[in-house]
């Protein structure tokens, strides 16, 4: 009978991504309720020495798939290998992060395994051995509680930055197992030829702890420097609304919202952003939302924890000055 929680860890350039520790922690919380074990699967190249760290967050066992074929993510290689592992291990639950990679991988895996999946969940629970998941629907206007049919594993992806991370315990050492690397390579249709990096080396918005976003109220690309200054002072990343991106003021990678990135930082400061439903869809699970807008009726204030009704060109530089005073 299927039992245990399996989580798929994610790495980039050989470094395990934060979302992996979140899913391991969540997996551990669910497994404890059932007296189950947590098995993490880590794919990459030269990553075996990193596997132990997944144990610090709650993995009892880590299956390491270490080979050049898995150095960079490709859907077909990852899906083929993880499908074999899932069939051999027969977990009750299969969880991964709802990152760009996790959303793609999860969708293909669920089709390959012939099971249902809840994407981009903000809460998971175990009920009598069955997984239940809470996920935003209608662009974040409502939350749905979903359950699964009897078929195992019950699959879910979790929104990055939402699940609480366990305190790492370096005295926990997981069993580390090398996966069988054999596979039918004729089924691999894609190969990563080259990875082109963002030269700025910015933190990916989905992993940022603090985000300051600018919208049409910024009035032009030349004014984003005031957001960059505040971001530098508080250690934040800069995002944007679609209007700012469509106007060519910011790159698409900075767009937050339904057709951009979905983010859940600890602090989200929206500057000159009205708060359209499609923007809220991307940031409404942020822990603390601050809005700076000169229109007191802007819908963003309905979601904001703190609001400043004023001209952002006055407020943002003043805020930066105050932060600098405190931090010196
Ligand atoms: C299918 C679809 C998908 C979409 N996806 C996204 C998405 O992913 N992300 C997204 O953001 N949008 C998305 N949109 C667009 C969305 O509907 C809004 O048009 C957009 O979010 C508005 O951007 P904004 O708030 O920057 O601009 P506006 O709505 O024009 O708001 C600008 C705000 O700035 C304020 N302001 C102006 N000057 C100042 C000042 N000096 N000081 C303080 N405040 C000032 C104004 O009061 C106003 O509230 C999508 C739309 C559709 C139809």
Image (cartoon, grey):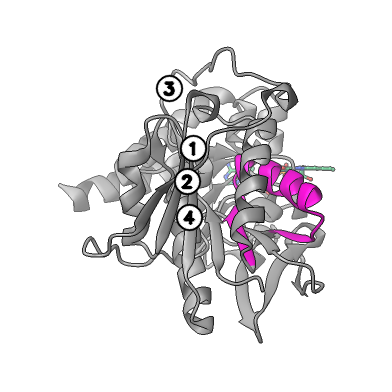
From the viewer's perspective, is 51 left or right of 308?
left
Q: Tell whether 217 sits left or right of 319.
A: right
Image position of 138 with respect to 269: above or below: below
**Contact, mark 4 vs mark 1 (Cβ under 8 Å):** no
Residue 201, relative to residue 125: is it above or below?
above
Q: Evaluate if marks 2 and 1 touch, with contact meaning CB atoms under 8 Å apart.
A: yes
Residue 167 lies in what quarter of the image? Answer: bottom left
Q: What residue is pinned by disc 4?
A: 40
Q: Position of residue 328 (x, y in %)?
A: 15, 47
* Rendering quarter of residue 21: bottom left
- Mark 4, other Cα within 10 Å: few <14 / some 14–19 / many ≥20: many
Q: Nearer the viewer, mark 4 or mark 1?
A: 4
Q: Which residue is mark 2?
A: 207
The residue closer to the viewer here, 213 or 321, is 213
Q: CA distance from mark 3 to mark 4?
A: 32 Å
- Which mark, by number, is residue 204? 1
Disc 1 crowd rating (10 Å Cα; few below 14, some 14-19, many 20+) is few
Of residue 314 and residue 177, the one placed in the foreground of this image is 177
Coordinates of residue 186 in the picture (x, y in percent): 72, 22
Q: Could you tell me which residue is drawn at 79 percent across and 61 percent down?
A: 116
Residue occupied by mark 3: 200
Q: CA distance from mark 1 to mark 3?
A: 11 Å
Q: Are dots 4 and 2 in contact, CB under 8 Å?
A: no
Split into quadrants, the picture shows ligand 1 in the one at: top right
């Amino acid at each position: 009978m299927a039992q245990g929680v399996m989580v798929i860890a994610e790495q980039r350039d050989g470094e395990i991504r934060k979302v992996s520790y979140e899913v391991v922690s969540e997996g551990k919380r669910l497994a404890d309720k059932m007296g189950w074990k947590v098995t993490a699967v880590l794919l990459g190249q030269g990553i075996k020495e990193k596997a132990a760290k997944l144990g610090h967050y709650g993995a009892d066992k880590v299956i390491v798939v270490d080979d050049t074929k898995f150095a960079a993510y490709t859907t077909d290689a990852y899906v083929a290998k993880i499908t074999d592992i899932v069939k051999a291990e027969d977990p009750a639950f299969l969880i991964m992060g709802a990152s760009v990679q996790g959303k793609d991988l999860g969708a293909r895996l669920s089709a390959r395994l012939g099971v249902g999946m809840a994407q981009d969940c903000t809460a998971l629970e175990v009920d009598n051995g069955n997984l239940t998941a809470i996920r935003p629907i209608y662009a974040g206007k409502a939350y749905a509680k979903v359950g699964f049919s009897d078929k195992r594993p019950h699959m879910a992806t979790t929104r990055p930055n939402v699940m609480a991370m366990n305190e790492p315990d370096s005295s926990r050492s997981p069993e580390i197992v090398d996966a069988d690397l054999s596979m039918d390579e004729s089924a691999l249709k894609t190969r990563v030829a080259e990875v082109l990096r963002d030269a700025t080396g910015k933190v990916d918005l989905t992993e940022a702890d603090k985000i300051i976003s600018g919208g049409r109220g910024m009035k032009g690309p030349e004014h984003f420097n005031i957001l960059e200054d505040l971001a530098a002072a508080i250690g934040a990343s800069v995002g944007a609304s679609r209007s700012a991106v469509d106007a060519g003021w910011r790159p698409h990678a900075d767009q937050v919202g339904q057709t951009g990135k979905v983010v859940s930082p600890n602090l989200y400061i929206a500057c000159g952003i009205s708060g359209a439903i499609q923007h809220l869809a991307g940031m409404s699970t942020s822990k603390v939302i601050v809005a700076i807008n000169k229109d007191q009726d802007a819908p963003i204030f309905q979601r904001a924890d703190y609001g400043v009704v004023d001209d952002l060109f006055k407020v943002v530089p003043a805020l930066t000055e105050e932060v600098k005073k405190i931090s010196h």
